[in-house]
Image (spheres, rainbow, N blue to C red):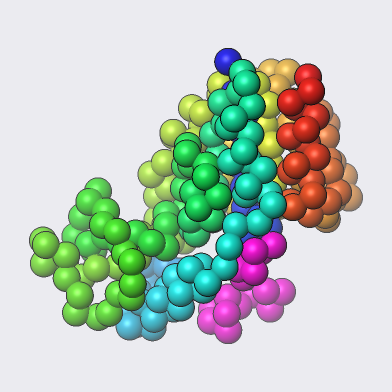
Amino acid sequence: MKHLVVLTGAGVSAESGIRTFRDSNGLWESHRVEDVASPEGFARNPELVLDFYNQRRAQARSVEPNAAHFALAGFEEEPGWRVTIITQNVDDLHERAGSTEVIHLHGMLNKMRSVKDESVVYDCPGDIHLGDLAPDGGQLRPHIVWFGEMVPLIEDAAAATGTADALLVVGTSLQVYPAAGLLHYAPVGCPVYVIDPHQPAAGRRGIQYVAEPATSGVPKILRELASV
């Protein structure tokens, strides 16, 4: 069975209406990233951070998967193919579209954990407030990998990439590490497709660039792979 590995970033969620990336002024929804997406920011003002992610969680629940999400989920039915999605996104749109093997590098909005123990993760269907405690007595926080924190699933992602027969990169600039380093784990000769309406001025050798949004570019490449 051939293995399709897909690395997705903010551009995929953006087409569903989620603003998950920094604006050109370096702010995230009018907040400094350091204030709402770092352990230091949480220590300074936990209420601000909890409220910020409560809003992000509500926003994620208000949108629907798009054609790219559904195409990737549908490809699991393609005979002879296994699909693994590695995503930098913290929403659950891939799962809601029907994808069954998804590695969330940066955590998930609909999960939470105690500040005392990152290994125990709970479902988070609603808001988290200051004073909401886990069973171990620790304050609950979003199950999000903040800047400066370890990315616990990066080894799983690297292992999956290392068995790829085709690698599809969608909606990410490949500028954020360690996720950007996953390309180096792809086997020699593995075809790599980058779907991004903003092509780099100088592309990398051996990569096929598709200058389209995810909603049209992903179905297009999947049709190509299915016909091989």
Horizontal and vertical percent position of residue 133: 17, 70
Q: Nearer the viewer, residue 223 or 205?
A: 223
Residue 110 located left or right of residue 17: left
Residue name at image x 63 percent, y 47 percent:
70
Asked if the magenta segment contains residue 29, the reply would be yes
Residue 80 located left or right of residue 118: right
Q: Hey, which quadrant is residue 148 in on the image?
A: bottom left
Residue name at image x 62 percent, y 21 percent:
79
Residue name at image x 60 percent, y 78 percent:
27
Q: Nearer the viewer, residue 206 or 99?
A: 99
Q: Of all residues shown, which one is farthest toward the left? A: 136
- Asked whether residue 43 is in view, the answer is no
Is residue 130 placed above or below 68 in the rendered structure?
below
Is residue 127 placed above or below 143 in the rendered structure?
below
Q: Nearer the viewer, residue 154 or 128?
A: 128
Which quadrant is the N terminus positioned in? top right
Q: Of all residues shown, which one is farthest toward the right? A: 201
Is residue 3 placed above or below 32 in the rendered structure?
above
Which quadrant is the C terminus positioned in? top right
Segment colored magenta: 14-35
Q: Of all residues shown, which one is farthest toward the top? A: 1
Asked if the magenta segment contains residue 66, the reply would be no
Horizontal and vertical percent position of residue 225: 75, 27
Residue 204 located left or right of residue 58: right
Is residue 16 placed above or below 216 in the rendered structure?
below
How many marks do you count on the picture? 0
- Asked whether residue 117 is in view, the answer is yes
Horizontal and vertical percent position of residue 189: 73, 18
Residue name at image x 54 percent, y 55 percent:
93
Q: Decide whether the magenta segment is chiefly helix, strand or loop.
A: loop
Residue 97 located left or right of residue 47: right
